[in-house]
Each structure stands twice: as C-alpha cells, then as structure tokens.
Image (cartoon, coloured by chain):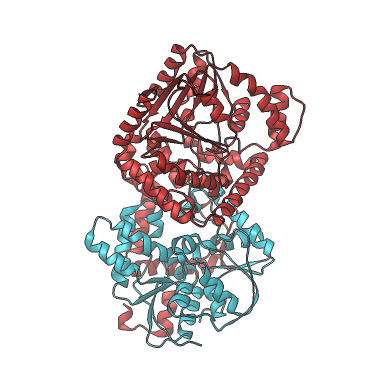
Chain colours: A red, B cyan
Amino acid sequence: MEPRVRHFVRNSEKAFADRQLQVALSRTTAKFLENRAAAVAEFPRFEGARESASRIRQEALDNLDAHLARFITEARKRGAVVHAARDGPEAREIAARIAKEEGVSLAVKSKSMIAEEVGLNGALEADGVEVVETDLGEYIIQLAGEPPSHIIAPAIHKTREDVSRLFEEKLGEPYTEEIPALTRIARRRLRDKFFSAQMGISGANFLCADTGSVVLVTNEGNGRMVATLPRVHMVIAGIDKVIPRLADLPVLLSLLPRSATGQALSSYVSVLTGTKRAGDAEGPERLHIILLDNGRTGILQGKYREILKCIRCGACINVCPVFQSVGGHAYGWVYPGPVGSVLAPLILGLPESSPLPNASTLCGACGEVCPVKIPIPGMLVELRGDEREQGLKTPAEVLGMKAYASVMSRAGILEAFQRVAGVVSALLFKERKIERLPFAFSGWTERRDFPAPAPQPFRKLWKRQRGIRPWTR
Amino acid sequence: MAQKRGISVSLFSTCLADTFFPSVCFATVAVLERFGVDVRVPLSQTCCGQPAFNSGNRKEARRMAAKFLSVFQGEEHIVTPSGSCAAMVKHEYPVLFRDEPRMLSLAYHVAGRVFELSQFLVDVLGVDDPGSTYRGKVTYHDSCHLKRGLGVADAPRTLLKAIRGVEFVEMEESDRCCGFGGVFSVKYPHISCRMADRKIERILETGAQVVTSGDIGCLMNIGGTISRSGYPVRAVHIAEILAGSEGAVP
Ligand code: SF4
C-alpha cells in the first residue's frame, strides 16, 4: 500500500465530509467498545492476564534471535520451507517465486496486515495470479478496490447499506440489507474458489518457537480453510510474531479476542504445525513461511522496542477518539490509530509520517486498554521529541517554544506580559472572550471562543490582597 | 467539619489559571482554608512546562521543569486545581530527567508531594463534605490526565455529591477526551472540535446546567465551544463549585 501519511489533515477533512463513514465508524467502534467493556468485566483475571501477556511478549523480544532460530528449526523439521525477507520488495519477490514454482494461478487468502504492509496481492497479481480475499471484510473492500481501514475490521468504514449496494453493483446480486444474507452471498461466491485454488495465503497471529507452529485466529473459519484446503499454504509473518512456547498461547488467546471485539473466544483458533503427514485428515502438502523484517530488527535495538510486543488486537484503535473521528484511511497507511502512529514513523521513517505522532491528544485511552501494556502515549511524545531533534519541526513552532520558555523562565517577565495582555484584554474583549485568534492559532477560534486574559493575573491580586511575605519569593 | 491545623500547602496555580481564571485560584485557596490549611503562594512560579513537553520540545520543557523544581522544592504539599499539570510533574518530570541523576531524585522528591485539589481534599485531608452550597444540576467531565494519569475519579464525585443544592448527574462517556490536548487543539483544530462536539452532546443529554471538571484546559475547550454556540449550560471549574464562589475575585 502506497503510504499517504503526509496528507493526514487533508484525509481527515475528507472523512468529516463523508456522512456514511461517520455513521459506520460510530456504530462499529461503539459496538466493539461496549463488548470489550463487558468482556473485561466478566473476566476478573483480566489485569493478571495482561501482566503475564506483557511479560511473555517481552521475553520473546528479549531473545528474539534465539526464539526465531528455534522456530525455524522446528518448522523445518516438520516440513515447512522457511524464507527470510529483509523488506517489502524482497517479500514480494519471494512470494512471486513461490507462486511460480508451485504453479499457482489462483490463491485464496485470509486477512493479513503484513501482506498489506508489503503489498503482496499486487505483486502476485502482476504475475498473473488471481488472489481472492476470503475474510468477509476483506472480500468487501477487495470488491470495492479499497485498502482496509482497520486491522481487525477492514471494512469498518462501510455501512451495511454500502455493502448491499456494492454486492448489487459488482456481483449482480439482488439488493438485501440482511447481514446473514450478505454473508451467504459471499460464502457461496467463495466456495468454488476455495476448492479450485492451488495456494492459500495467510498471516500469523503467533509463531510458537518450541513447536514451529503457526497460529491463526479468525472469526469466520476462513483461516483454517485457507490453510488446509489448497495444496500449498504460504504464511507471511513479521519476525515479531514469535512467542517462546506453545504453552504461552492460552493467556494470549484469553486477551486477544476480548480486546479486539469483546468476544471471550474467537470462533476459530488454528494451530498449524508443519505439512500434512501420512494419516492426517487435512493439511497442506507444501508449507512456505516468509519471515519479514522490514525495519523490525532496527526497532528492536532502539527505544521503541516495546511496540513490537503488539499483538494487533486493535483495541487502541477502537478506543481512540481521534480514530473515531477520522477513520482508518486518514492515517494513510496499513496500521491506523495509536499503534499505527507509532509504527508508521518507525517503519516508513519520521519525515514521511510526521503528522501522525502529533495527531493525538495524549488522552491515554490507548495505553489503558492495550492488553500487552505498551506505553503508547509516552512513545508518541518521544517521537515528537525526535522530530525536534531531527529538525523536522516547523521554524514557527521552534521559535514559539523558545519564546514561551523565555517568557516563562522568570515570573517578572511573565508578569510584564500579563500586564500588557490584561490592558489589551480590558480594552478589546469586554465580554471576556476572544472570537478570533491570529496566525497559527486561528484554527482554535474557528468554532470556539478563547478566554480573554484576566485584567489582573491571580498572583498580582494575591499580592495585593495578602501582601508579600518573604517566604513567598 | 474536619479541621486539619498545621498542614501547610503551597499553591501551584498553573499559568493558565493565573492568567485567565484568577477566580479558580482564589476558590482553591478558599476551599483549602476552610479546612484550616495554611496556604502559601510561591510568587516566582510560572508554568510547569507541559506545552513544551507534550509537543516534544524537551529542551524547553526541561528548562521549565528545572524552574518549577527550584521554586517548589522543600514544600510539604503542592496542590493545584489542574489534573494535567499535576500529572505533568508527577509522571513526566522523571522522564525528562532520566539521564540526570541529581535532577531525577529531586523530580521524584517533588513528584511525591504534588496533588490535584479534589485528590488532596479527599485522600490527604479526609474530607467527604466540602461544606458548601451551590444551586444546580451538575455533571462532571473526567479530565484524561486526572483520571488515567493520576487515577482520580471518585474524589471529585464524592465531593460534588456532598454539596448542598447540587443535583449530580453522570454523563455518558464522561472519561472520553474532550479534544483539547494542548498543542493538539492548535495543530488539529478540526479534529479537536469534532471531539468537543461529541462531549457537548453528552453534556446536553444530561440536562445539566453546569459541567465541571478538574482541569483548566478541558474547561477552556468545552467552555469555548459552549460560549460560541450558545448552548444552555455553563462550564465551571470544580474549585469554584466546591467554594461556592463562581467567578469571584476579591
Ligand atoms: S498496541 Fe496494544 S492495543 Fe494496540 S493493537 Fe497492539 S496490542 Fe492491541
């Protein structure tokens, strides 16, 4: 996906104007949040589970190379072919080569953000491979020719009515707004694809180092079908997906669906270990696993390494009031919301993504819900600091901040400013409000008033009222 | 009424309240003095540095933080009518000085002495009735930094509910950000206003005459939106309700 992160402001304006989007956003995020709150309330060990999950993910990162090596050995032992991709182009090349060597003309795919990150579909399609998305949400946006706008609910920006119209237009199906009917249409369309595809493509929610297993969590069961029906299964996963032990799964799985959609359990969890063995009822004959770095080793070595603990549950996205206002497409890249605002600068580069770390009120809601306790707000502030250090701030902001610090460095200077402001304010703003601020502040007063400075600041009044005592200085 | 003689408090007035809302500072003093607290106001204080810190301008933030620490070091209790300013000192000063051991220990020392007003009244003074009178239906907005930063959500409610004449109503999504975010509201005014709109919607649903909060920033944002659109509700700082002295400057 071509990043358009720089256009965040323009993108958000577009989102505001889109009434359908606003309806869809508030419906879905509200539902997710309500369900999440209920699921957490019914799960008294939630905080304890968060603590353990956070520790497990930290442990995985602390020894990532060892766990990865173990994963690769174990997966190979069980028949998998493991490939390492340094970046997006390399991953695309490997995937295209696999498709060619395995003689693939049709592939079915379950939802994968990593595939979006590297632009996998485009690479395969350019080689004449038809890639069909089988997750309902992904199927919808593939039909619409749009990128996903949420990591859990890719079509969150579409209302039921949008989907009905889309199915009518693109598939020639009779118009229906019934969700079960829409699902049935998609299922029927997909069934043939599942049986004729030569390859299934999926991401991975976790990679277990001690067994070489790939864990897939889905709600529709399509992940399992993608992984087991076609002859070849191709997995693409970030190297950060490794967990030390299969035994770590239960606690992670107790948090992932609860945090994501508020379900106690996802409908389908598949632990896929190796290729089909003699006597197995199902499973792929060939299993390829592409492990993608794409900047992750670099992140691991720096001060933002904790972001790699992320299990992509999307809770921080659902709860973010900025996301709720602008939607996922405004962020301009694969990962929206708070997690995206940290990942984009780290993977795409800070100059390329500089609006994102700033596009947060630091309200802290994301950090509060994150099941693996990633301090996202702190990271956003840290990135803003890096921006200053790398000279990416506007001269106006830097100058403004220097001026602010000079005024505030001495109470006397502040008082002088307050005196002037008080006089001006008494003359100009009789109603004690400012209706138009100048320059960079003009946006503030477009739809709100700004308070006028008091004629006399508090400390001055206090001095007059109580007199100055030596210890007050 | 519990009187706590011998407790002395240093008022951290905050630059915003000092400049724009002196009545909030006076109300804070009045409430504290009502409980026998000896309040002093260090006159050389200015700003805690939050605008610089939050926008990633660490150098300026560090300069402000150092100034704040030099003014307030040695004080027994530092009380402020602003949740976000308290959270700044408590949680972010240690971040700013993580590489300067001497400043870091001073930062921790002072951080342990900073309280937001309602938190101080309830947790330190043990107040459960502010002993004031105020007429009206009041709803409360949780400031992000007061609730998620300092973990203070019950104290203001306990106090508000105990005030004679106050009919307290909860709003939906009371802890959803109002969209202020300091520099955010200047850099992204349109998003900020969308968030304020939703907050106002929730406030109006309650039918309250007054919305209150423990943070000057939120009240500037919510109050400014109300004043521009003429909504039938007022934004009043919680200190003024506790003091029963809205807008009063001696
Ligand atoms: S950062 Fe935390 S809350 Fe956000 S997607 Fe990752 S795990 Fe979930």
Tell me if B70 is positioned left or right of A416 in this view. Answer: left
- Classify B148 as above or below A344: below
Tell me if B241 is positioned left or right of A287 in this view. Answer: right
Which residue is at a point 38% across and 36% down the rendered structure image?
A240
Residue A138, position in %: x, y? 58, 30
- Classify B175 as above or below A456: above
Asked whether residue A272 is in view, the answer is: yes
Residue A246, position in %: x, y? 41, 39
- Picture quadrant of residue B244: bottom right
Q: Nearer the viewer, residue B13 or A141?
A: A141
Q: Nearer the viewer, residue A321 or B215?
A: A321
Question: Which quarter shows the C terminus of chain A?
Answer: bottom left
Which residue is at a point 38% across and 44% down the rendered structure image?
A57
Residue B245, position in %: x, y? 56, 79
- Picture quadrant of residue A298: top left
Tell me if B140 is positioned left or right of A356 in this view. Answer: right
